[in-house]
Amino acid sequence: MSLQFLPISRDEIERLGWRSVDAVLITGDAYVDHPSFGAAVIGRVLEAEGYRVAILSMPPWRTAEAVTVFGRPRLFFGVTSGNVDSMLARFTAFRKVRNDDPYAPGGAGGGKPERAVIVYANMIRAAYKDVPIVLGGIEASMRRFAHYDFWDDRVRRSILLDSRADILVHGMGEAQIVEIADRLNAGAALSDIPGTVEVRRDLPAGAHLLPPEAEALKDRDAYARFYREFYLNQHRLLAQESGKRYIVQHPSPRMESERLDAIYRLPFARLPHPSYGGEVPGFSVIRDSITSHRGCVSGCAFCSLGLHQGRRIVPRSAGSIMEETARISAANGFGGHITDIGGPSANMYGTDCAAGWKCARESCLHPDLCPNLRINTRSWLKLLRQALGVPGVKHVTVGSGIRYDLFMRDDPSLLDDLARNHVSGQLKIAPEHTSVGVLDVMRKKHLYGLEEFAEAFFAASRKAGKRQYLLPYLMSCHPGCRMADMKAMRERVLTTFGFMPEQVQAFIPLPLTLSSAIYHTGLDPLTGEKVFVARGEQERRGQHDVFHKKRNS
């Protein structure tokens, strides 16, 4: 029988009558039993396979005893920093300490350490010398090889080495964690598992050899060469020499829609654990939202989504999404509003590839729209309309926003339906910038004019008898961006939207993204071209203040 929540304390273990647990999952976030929280998903997947799982949420990190709450797990410890990289959670784009954390009870900051994955893993090693440690989540995934670290301002080696863990799961890890648990249960070795990274003494047959880690750590040109090989060969078995060993990445397993449906069918409580005294702000945002698919075709240089989830769009079935809609509408306190059916890659539901996602291009959208890409906006809007037919549902809107240029390149006539039925006053879009040169470095060429879309959206809103607004997300300080580009963007945005948006993010070089490699090296590793980089604090702050002269960051 499934538990309403997975146990998070020794008392809960004892009330269940368990003498021990098979796996302990450590997370730097509050335990929210919802499919948007990775630790909850992995815990429920293992539970469905018959394993006993406990969650150790936000453990005190100054003593190794904190990881002994449940005793020695029979199989392994799983470690994640949570939904975001712990350095991003702790520091702003200008390296100031954050006072808040949306994934902590009450939103209070300071609940997780810097480099949480390394800290938690080393706590485990101090308490239990030989229990297997499995790393997962975005922090581990995007630090799996040598990577530029903005906060240290240097290239760091693989997090697998610094954590002294046994194996690292990259990407979305449901299939990998079951394989790991099954092998440990059978006493088998943790080697050659798809979607994992391991350290081994031998070079696997057929591996594509990356430039050595030692070179990438010391020399910027060498890092650019390494990054190019890494970025363009995710479909292959990769290996990087590190001392007398090799860091080996096995390509991700293929996720199918049926498996995705099964994951979202698991018995999530869809609530934070009741032991927390305060609301978890990050949960409040997605409480009544639904993730419709995985993957992202955009390939934006600054984003980790494509390298983490993959380019291929894996949709859930309409039936699965309607089942989740019905569960939400039946929950106590539901107000009748489904706040999103989409996800991080917005309106890409239903997008397919005529070549079966077997392609040598670096991006489906850059430098132009791939002729094999099949956008299917109509299938996504059909989902929104279906959800409106579920008893108890009064409104279905698009909280995550849309990639407006894909929307308009597919079928502009659908904008009337979107504006009339699925916008709650504001529609988020993310042009990121208006300079063609900056957008080219970002790998985010606009496929439809920003001003033309704004005019069409406002017209569709008027036609629907509604006064609605566009909420543009923009970025300062990205490689390729100069002060003149920021000033030009300011004027263009003010002219287009009639106000100065607050949603301007100072660029942060996230580990292992293409933009971070450009920022570190001053080169585009895929083209070899030199790129201007605003690197100094004063120069970065100056760009950001074009939009935010009176705000603190």
Image (cartoon, rainbow, N blue to C red):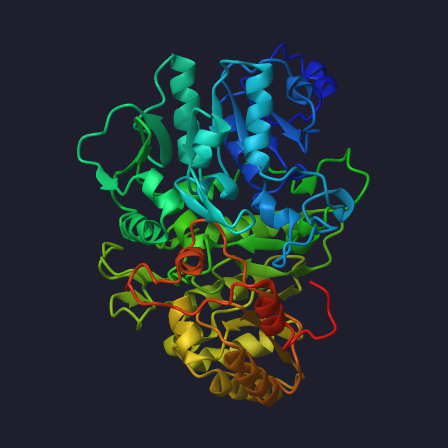
Q: Which residue is at 30% across, 40% downward?
A: 251
What is the quadrant of residue 400 in the picture? bottom right
Q: Is 97 situated left or right of 540 in this image?
A: right
In this view, the residue farthest toward the top is 19
In this view, the residue farthest toward the left is 206
In this view, the residue farthest toward the right is 277
Residue 99 in sight from this viewpoint: yes
Q: Is 298 situated left or right of 397 in this image?
A: left
Image height of 149 relative to 428, above or below: above
Q: Which residue is at 52% across, 21% downward?
A: 51
Q: Between 191 and 455, which is closer to the camera in this rendering?
A: 191
Q: Is 363 situated left or right of 11 in this image?
A: left
Residue 317 location in percent, x, y? 43, 51
Q: Between 417 and 147, which is closer to the camera in this rendering?
A: 147
Q: Is 359 situated left or right of 299 in this image?
A: left
Q: Which residue is at 64% across, 57% downward?
A: 391
Residue 95 location in percent, x, y? 63, 54
Q: Which residue is at 71% across, 23% downward?
A: 9
Residue 20 location in percent, x, y? 60, 12
Q: Which quadrant, please, contains the C terminus?
A: bottom right
Residue 267 in sight from this viewpoint: no
Q: Which quadrant, please, contains the N terminus?
A: top right
What is the quadrant of residue 56 in the picture? top right
Image height of 470 relative to 120, above or below: below
Q: Between 239 and 5, which is closer to the camera in this rendering?
A: 239
Residue 379 location in percent, x, y? 42, 65
Q: Between 535 and 474, which is closer to the camera in this rendering?
A: 535
For the image shown, how many numbered marks are present on the structure? 0
